[in-house]
Image: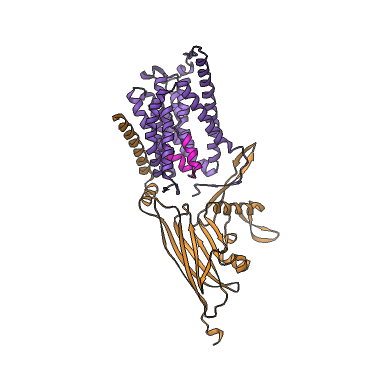
Amino acid sequence: LDIYLPIAEVSVNGPLLIALGAAVGFVSGLFGIGGGFLMTPVLVLMGVPPTVAVASEANHVAASSTSSVISYGRKRAVDFRMGTVLAAGGAIGSLVGVELFRKLRLLGQADLVVALSYLVFLGVIGGLMLTESAAAVLRRRRGEPPKRRGDRRPPWLYGLPLKMRFPRSRLYISVIPPLALGAFVGVLSAIMGVGGGFILVPAMVYVLRMPAAVVVGTSLFQIIITTGLTSVLQAGRNQTVDIVLSTLLLAGGVLGAQFGARASSRFRAEELRALLGLIVLLVGLRMGLGLFVTPEEPFVMISGGQ
Amino acid sequence: MTAADVPPPVVAAALTESEVRVTSSFRGARIVLYGAVFDREARPSDVVVLVRGPEQPIRIARKINVAGLWVNSRPVVFAGAPGFYMAASTRPLAEIAGFSTLRRLGAGIDHLPINAPAEQRIETRYGVRDMVVSRLGSDYLVWRRAVVRLKAGAGLYDTDETGVRFVDRGLFRSEIALPAGAPTGDYEARIILFQGGRPVAERVRTLRVEKAGFERGLYLFAHDRPWSYGVASVVIALAAGWAASAAFRRN
């Protein structure tokens, strides 16, 4: 059952895409991430041009995140004020990111930057998550008490101007760090076709020191805004959003996300983090591998030649 | 009857379809071309079919190793390359006609005028004026071969040395295989009759590949009103997310 994608101009297997969307949606709901870092590489492997994959995937992430945020919102696990500040930064970031991606494509270096971003960001974060959570799992197995999280917040978080109250996160901090974090994630969203949850979640826990209960929901809320904006910008500037592709993906994705969110209560947090860390690390290494292996075909066609 | 009274040979041809509609179930198309050679004298004839799709500039980069990493070189833009090209003939082209004839007709992938205009400059060398010098130098052929290889790999360039077959006296048949990734636009099929190494008759048939129905609507929407299209895509995404969450809540 092949379906022709009008913007990507390739035909792909429809049921396979829906199944992939569902699988990634499940992972997304389970871990509270967008799942773009898994889906974009798979789409590229299936022959979808990378520029279309990145742009359409942002749209898919927006859909599965909406599906999860509504559930988190009901449990009062979303800090909408913090999410909005992050998203304001994200808006600036995705504007910059879409333009940057355009320039890189014209220079022929988009592939390199995408591969390097995957290798560096996924490699480092996957590695950190895996070691931290594996240590936590081991401590519990040995019956030792869990390590106390240092409640000391970095002083620079308080020294900066423009302080704002975030009641749901029980924080009173400067808006500059969340704005900067949002902007950084916005750039990644445009370049890597990801929501950026894999960076936002650890950054909110370890840098902003937000309570764990609101981290995932808030991250997903900001992801909706950033990826939604990225979709509009990619469509408007580059005409690379394929609605048929993103609709196939999100049809499976929104359902998978619901099942994933339910399944997540059956696992311990540190086990989930260890598994996620492993997946993130493997995807990063797989994407980076191409940079080191001697290519069979020394020439590559670069899309977007107009 | 003298030679002057014999009417010149004529070639006639037709395509089974002159319009290919690209819809959601499009997986490529096979178009049959059939034709006939009318020649009183029945001299030995060869038929060459050249199909050209709309021209598309190609940007291509070479992987180079920088400090252990494989990265893309500066991309080179090649012009003059058709988005689709097929050369089918009754015999290998080199046996049908000489080099200069094939070059003049642009018959065969080796004779396509694919070059990189941005890399060229015109200068005087060895006292010869207006010489075209490519910055790619002797590597130019390697780059050109890569363009052809990548296009052929995608099923967009094809040379079939036995692609035209005489099925009966003067009656021949050929097939054009369009892959799913074939560019949309106007195609031109030239059917050339060769006798004694010279082209003696020619016929041109046109073919139109266009997106149709729903696909066409979406494509036009995305390109004519890109911002509304972007907003629509986000609205669909948010609505789908909300719908799934609402449906699951009821259960």
Q: Residue A154, how many percent across, how many down?
A: 49, 16
The hue of chain B in the figure is orange
Q: Relative to residue A246, is residue A122 depicted above or below?
A: above
Most extreme residue toward the left is B250
Q: Magenta span has A57? A: yes
Of A253 and B4, nearer the camera is: A253
Name the tint of chain A in the rendering: purple
Is residue B114 visible to the viewer in this orientation of the structure? yes
Residue occupying the far bottom of the picture: B1
Residue B116, magenta (yes or no): no
Total label count? 0
**Picture coordinates of residue B64 (x, y %)?**
63, 42
Position of A166 relative to B191 (above/below): above
Question: In which quadrant is the N terminus of chain B drawn?
Answer: bottom right
Say left or right for B51 vs A71: right
Residue A202 visible, this orientation: no
Q: Main secondary structure of the magenta part?
A: helix
> Could you tell me residue B104's position as x and y percent?
58, 66
Say whether residue A123 is left or right of residue A26.
right
- Name the quadrant containing residue A256: top left
Image quadrant containing the C terminus of chain B:
top left
- Residue A54: x and y in percent read 46, 39
Q: Is residue B191 above or below residue B69?
A: below
Which residues fall within the magenta stretch? A38-58
The furthest residue to the right = B126
